[in-house]
Image (cartoon, grey):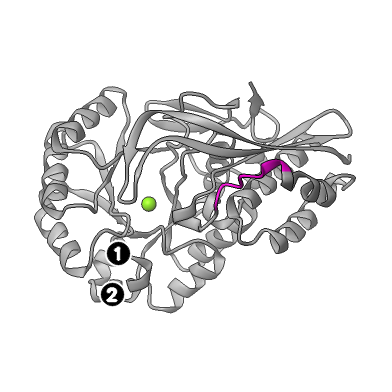
Amino acid sequence: MKISKVSYWKEDMKLTRPYAVTYVMHDSVQNIFVRLDGSDGSYGLGAGSPSEHVAGERMDDNCENRIPEIEELLIGKDIRSFKNIIVQLALIYHDKPALLAALDMALHDLFCKHIDISIGSYFGVRLAPIPTSITIGIKNVEETVEEGIEYKDRNFKIIKLKIGQSIEEDIERSIKLREAVGKDMIIRVDANQGYNVDKFEQYLKETNVANIEFFEQPMKPAVVHDMLQLSSEVREICAADEDLHKHKDALRLVKMGRPFGIFNIKLMKCGGLTEAGRIADVAHTENIELMWGCMDESVISISASLNIALACDATRYLDLDGSLDLASDVASGGFKLENGILYPLLDKAGLGVELL
Ligand SMILES: [Mg+2]
């Protein structure tokens, strides 16, 4: 089967719940979408969420202008050689990870439809379904507690709390959230680079009662060596996010003395399923645990992340709540969410998503 048509567009998607992280306030998000039509009438879908502050990738304002070059790269290509096509694309779009992720995903989707298996079966899903965390952004104590109770009532099992703006308020929010949601809720935190060693150690000490599961990206990548001042026990429960984009970062972190015991893989940072698999191999070899994260994303790319996550032995944590706050999406399906647990759709071909 050959690729006969390429569609590429961007879409504004409103968020049901505007939120802040340490950088800026968000109330809507743009994603890019790729549709590859096959000569047999099937189609493959991919989605990307470009992020300037995370990956240095600006949303391409001239979306349509890019179509001729992508058509040139893909039209007429035999989908059975999709891995070779991805290698060629990665050479060209290595600094556009969300675009590359969308193309890599659409090629996987189309190939899996061609051979009529789910993407999960293709990768070999072998882990039992895992609960996803749901995120509480930076907000005041009352709003934090209120949102925490809402998530508990909706049967979520894990909350990811964004911190990193004000140490005193972070400590108070963490403790009050724990009091409000009870001892059975898992709480993990993401400082989004907001601390230094002293502040992080203060946070650790003063939130001991809050029983935090792990700590994502406490400090800036520029001071990653400072992480080595922390005890190895603490480093084991720290997750690299902004410090880990691609496979080469995974190797660098391992070689510099293991500042993190957890890697947070995001398709939008690394450039898709192919590169994600390489990071996962490093993690597995080095006994580093994997977390799978996302941006604000369509169900298309959340399905891709979920399926590869459950096919990697090192996977322990999911943070795949990126489509849950979208007021609209271009596709449906991809996974089932029940009581905070994400279930892949292993009986549907490809990513298991349909355009709306
Ligand atoms: Mg993060």
Above or below 176: residue 53: below
Q: Inspect the image, locate mark 2, and give the three-letter code of the amino acid beneath it.
A: Asp
Pinpoint residue 241: horizontal percent, then vertical percent. Answer: 41, 57
From the image, tell me which residue sits under label 2. 226
Q: How many numbered markers are drawn?
A: 2
Residue 262 in sight here: yes
Provide the residue span drawn in magenta.
58-64
Residue 279 circle label: none
Q: What is the C-alpha distance between the residues marked 1 and 2? A: 8 Å
Q: Is residue 115 left or right of residue 195?
A: right
Instruction: Identify the residue at horizontal 16%, vertical 63% (top origin).
Output: 199
Q: Is residue 327 left or right of residue 65?
A: left
Residue 265 in sight here: no
Pinpoint residue 273: horizontal percent, then vertical percent. Answer: 62, 51
Above or below 117: residue 219: below
Q: Is residue 1 left or right of residue 262?
A: right
From the image, tell me which residue sits under label 1. 219
